[in-house]
Image (cartoon, helix red, strand yellow):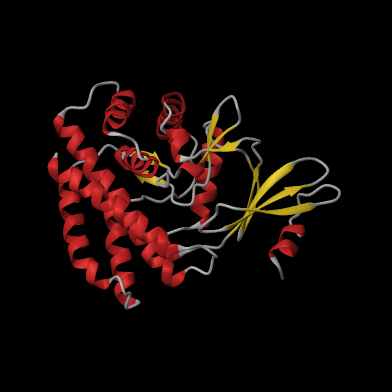
Amino acid sequence: MTHQDRILRLPIWQGGVQIAPLGGGITNLNFLVQDAARRAVVRIGDDIPIHQIMRFNELSASTAAHAAGVSPAVLHAEPGALVIDFVEGRTMTAADLRQPALLGQALDLIARAHREIPRHLRGPVLTFWVFHVIRDYAATLCDAASPHLPFLPELLDQAAALEAAVGPIDLVFGHNDLLPGNFLHDGTRMWLIDWDYAGFNSPLFDLGGLAANSGLSPDQETDMLARYFGRAPDAVLLRRYLAMKAAAALRETLWSMVSEHHSTLDFDYATYTATNLSTYRTAYDTFRQA
């Protein structure tokens, strides 16, 4: 059965159905579907244990995120398929999120997600601890005899230093994958989509991920922390934040290294690995100098 056949068999459509592929997904396949009543996005993807993606968790997070007002509505879900309401808008880029007004909207949305989503969660959900993910990815790369193995001892030693520097954490419900492409703007407001990696985590992970993925300047990062926490960051908070930012970049690097071996999607993971490794090394050097 093709993906289009699978979509056509979903029991929610009214009248004729038109299906078009949507780009952007690197852990699932996305399609835009138009029927007689509405447009919707269909996400096709099964569990990916190697990346700790469990679709029951994505569904719980997506449903709660809509109830919290930060994400589009879930229209239908069944094993391997999630249908969400289509938002007419523009996908954000790193350059967009470096603009003060749009960055402010993104930060307010993140804070709302952290604060409000736990009030709407039902049933079991996951925890996302980046340092566990890093260690697990390293073990997966060892099992696969990855050509990246020579990098791992140094990276794991650095990860241990970063984990110690982060120290005790506050716990929020994080998105944990704040790539610019997961923000949409409809001309009036911003939306946050794609809850594959959602789970309880430190807020510093989402903030660090946003900064690393959007290329924020040091001054923008200071302003970001002040806006989120309601006070200017002191030296202790800043160092903890820089440690988590580096960890976020390291996790993205190892994610890509693992995907080079295990993903069947048409995506240039090797280039993505090289880009993220460079981002990580810059973030780690900044942490060491703090």
- Tally the numbered discs: 0
Residue 124 at x, y = what percent?
45, 50
Q: Residue at x 19, y 41 (%)?
A: 168
Q: Residue at x 31, y 49 (%)?
A: 248
Left or right? Give the position of 180 relative to 28. Answer: left
Camera-side residue: 34 or 187? 187
Camera-side residue: 262 or 229? 262
* Residue furthest out toward the right: 15
Residue 159 at x, y = what percent?
21, 55
Q: Residue at x 34, y 39 (%)?
A: 211
Q: Quadrant of residue 169?
A: top left
Asked if one can make out residue 129 in the rendered structure from this viewpoint, the answer is: no
Q: From what the image shows, is residue 261 above or below residue 248?
A: below
Q: From what the image shows, is residue 233 above or below residue 161?
A: above
Residue 219 at x, y = what percent?
27, 28
Residue 55 at x, y = what percent?
52, 56
- Image quadrant for the C terminus? top left
Q: Residue at x 75, y 64 (%)?
A: 5
Q: Quadrant of residue 36?
A: top right
Left or right? Give the position of 79 relative to 4. Answer: left
Asked if one can make out residue 159 in the rendered structure from this viewpoint, the answer is: yes
Q: From what the image shows, is residue 205 above or below residue 119?
A: below
Q: From what the image shows, is residue 205 above or below residue 141?
A: above
- Image quadrant for the N terminus? bottom right
* Residue furthest out toward the top: 231
Left or right? Give the position of 47 relative to 203. Answer: right
